Image (cartoon, grey):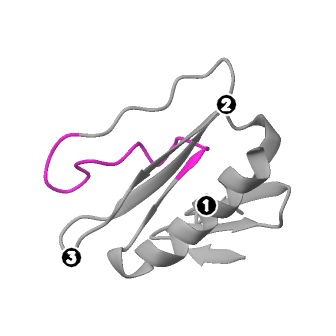
């Protein structure tokens, strides 16, 4: 399953999560995370005014905090390799992807 994010895509094949962000000036390098390695998932639904995000937390790492302010408010930094922002119209698809990852973790 694959979901379109605000600045990239996130896909899950049943074992691996792949986050590919769009980048300016160079070719994006996808980040692959094994679902069994994920210790927690953060999901913030988007609304018509602010994008939501999904973030996967791994052992030994603390998740990137949320930005404050109107433009980037409520989302982790673009540089966080384990998160992806998405538009509110993709809320349901992202929730399905997170549910599949949570199921694979068990």
Q: Residues within 10 Å of mark 2 (few under 14, many from 20)?
A: some
Which mark, by number, is residue 58?
2
**Which is more foreground, mark 2 or mark 1?**
1
- Percent x, y for residue 58? 67, 31
Q: Is residue 40 above or below residue 46?
A: above
Which element type, helix, strand or loop, lies under badge 3?
Answer: loop
Based on the picture, tell me whether residue 106 belongs to the magenta stretch.
Answer: no
Outermost residue on the top side: it is 60
For the question of whether residue 98 can be seen, the reply is yes
Q: Which residues are magenta?
A: 68-83
- The residue where tag 3 is placed is 48
The quadrant the C terminus occupies is top right
How packed is label 3: few (under 14 Cα within 10 Å), some, or many (20 or more)?
A: few
Distance, label 1 to label 3, CA atoms, is 23 Å
Name the residue: 71% across, 68% down.
11
Please state which of the two labelled residues, at mark 1 or mark 3, is closer to the viewer: 1
Total numbered badges shown on the rendered structure: 3
Between discs 2 and 1, the one toward the N terminus: 2
Q: Main secondary structure of the magenta part?
A: loop
Report if residue 34 is visible in the image.
no
**The image quarter in which residue 68 lies:** top left
Q: Secondary structure at mark 1?
A: helix
Q: Are marks 2 and 1 in contact (CB under 8 Å)?
A: no
């Amino acid at each position: 399953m694959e979901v379109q994010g605000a600045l990239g895509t996130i896909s899950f094949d049943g074992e691996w999560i792949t986050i590919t962000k769009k980048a300016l000036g160079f070719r994006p390098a996808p980040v692959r995370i094994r679902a069994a390695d994920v210790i927690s998932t953060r999901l913030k639904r988007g609304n018509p005014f602010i994008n939501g995000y999904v973030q996967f937390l791994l052992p030994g790492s603390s998740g990137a905090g949320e930005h404050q302010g109107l433009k980037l408010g409520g989302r982790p930094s673009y540089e966080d390799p384990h998160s992806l922002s998405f538009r509110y119209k993709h809320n349901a698809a992202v929730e399905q992807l997170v549910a599949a990852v949570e199921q694979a973790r068990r």
